[in-house]
């Protein structure tokens, strides 16, 4: 793994240098948008809605759009002036019981590895958190944004998990919450007993992504059945013809040049080269036609 951040865990007088690594990864199979006619990738362009022109990345800035449609543009220099005191610091603000951390507020997790000079204080903090049954609430800046976070221990490794800010968690407003629903004892007891009968130990390895597995099987079946298309843009076919024409023209020009200045012997060599080039051009054209026929056959199937 490659570290994505370096900094220091700071609490009290302690300073533990650490490196952060992304703790999770998604195994989704990425499907691209393709042109059904030839299998070419569909690409998105950055287009200005004012003049319709494609905009290079170097001319793109960030900004804020106001309700009336006016915008305020912000440059990198503007953003650099904003306060971000915890750029290289995981600033511990409090130690709290683990059960006080609501899972809905958790976002992305990172493994923290100690630098050689910080191994002993790192292990000490890890052991203390486990024995105390506590998590550390922290503030940290990752990817140019300050986040709330929590430090906890998993398999002897301290894990930093970023959290949503309190105002980023929506309040559920559903009509049924304002209705009086009467529950009788036997109904509740029956529901509890059903839950207890289905209770067990959560073993993550027992659960698999059946959709992803089925998609992998489908792709493999397509490959084995040779339902595979090699994307070819229309201009590639035109390029073959253009190449043949240009080659023939250059050979004819060479023949005329040799005939004018170098005698019959050179003319004969030039004509021989012309014949070979013309034959090679013919083979290239035949190969292109054959490839086009195969592509049309696959499409008709």
Image: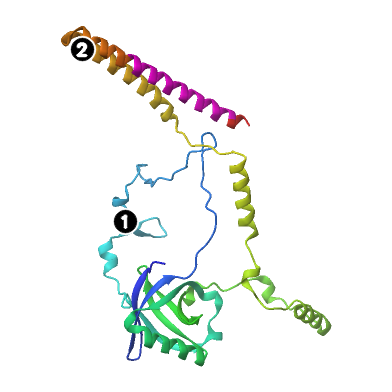
Inspect the magenta stretch and tell me whether residue 296 lies in it. Answer: yes
Q: Nearer the viewer, residue 190 or 48?
A: 190
| Side of 257 where 13 appears, left or right | right
Q: Is residue 130 visible?
A: yes
Q: Which mark is residue 258?
A: 2
Q: Earlier in the sequence, mark 2 or mark 1?
A: 1
Residue at the spot 51% in from the left edge and 34% down from the top edge: 38
SS of the residue at dot 1?
loop
Q: Residues within 10 Å of mark 2 (few under 14, many from 20)?
A: some
Q: Is residue 256 visible?
A: no
On the image, the x and y values in percent for residue 253 come to 25, 14
Q: Residues within 10 Å of mark 1 (few under 14, many from 20)?
A: few
Instruction: Report which residue position mark 1 lands on.
Output: 61
SS of the residue at dot 2?
helix
Whole-number angstrom distance, CA of label 2 to CA of label 1:
59 Å
Q: Nearer the viewer, residue 108 or 51?
A: 108
């Amino acid at each position: 793994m490659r570290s994505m951040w370096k900094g220091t865990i700071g609490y009290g007088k302690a300073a533990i240098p650490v490196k952060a690594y992304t703790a999770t990864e998604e195994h989704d199979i990425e499907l691209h948008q393709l042109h059904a006619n030839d299998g070419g990738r569909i690409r998105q362009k950055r287009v200005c809605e004012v003049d319709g022109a494609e905009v290079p990345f170097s001319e793109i800035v960030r900004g804020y759009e106001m309700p009336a449609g006016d915008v305020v543009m912000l440059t990198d220099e503007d953003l650099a002036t904003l306060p971000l005191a915890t750029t290289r610091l995981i600033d511990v603000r409090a130690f709290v019981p683990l059960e006080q951390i609501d899972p809905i507020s958790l976002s992305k997790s990172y493994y923290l590895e100690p630098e050689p000079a910080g191994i002993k204080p790192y292990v000490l903090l890890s052991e203390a958190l486990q024995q105390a049954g506590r998590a550390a609430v922290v503030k940290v800046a990752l990817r140019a944004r300050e986040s709330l976070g929590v430090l906890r221990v998993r398999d002897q490794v301290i894990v930093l998990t970023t959290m949503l800010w309190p105002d980023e968690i929506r309040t559920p407003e559903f009509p049924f919450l304002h209705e009086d629903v009467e529950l009788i004892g036997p109904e509740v007891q029956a529901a509890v007993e059903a839950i207890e009968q289905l209770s067990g130990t959560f073993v993550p390895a027992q659960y698999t992504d059946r959709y992803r597995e089925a998609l992998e099987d489908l792709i493999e079946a397509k490959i084995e059945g040779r339902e595979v298309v090699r994307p070819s843009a229309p201009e590639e076919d035109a390029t073959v013809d253009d190449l043949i024409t240009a080659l023939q023209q250059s050979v004819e020009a060479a023949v005329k040049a040799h005939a004018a200045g170098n005698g019959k012997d050179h003319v004969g060599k030039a004509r021989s080269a012309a014949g070979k080039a013309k034959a090679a051009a013919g083979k290239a054209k035949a190969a292109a036609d054959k490839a086009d026929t195969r592509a049309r056959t696959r499409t008709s199937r």
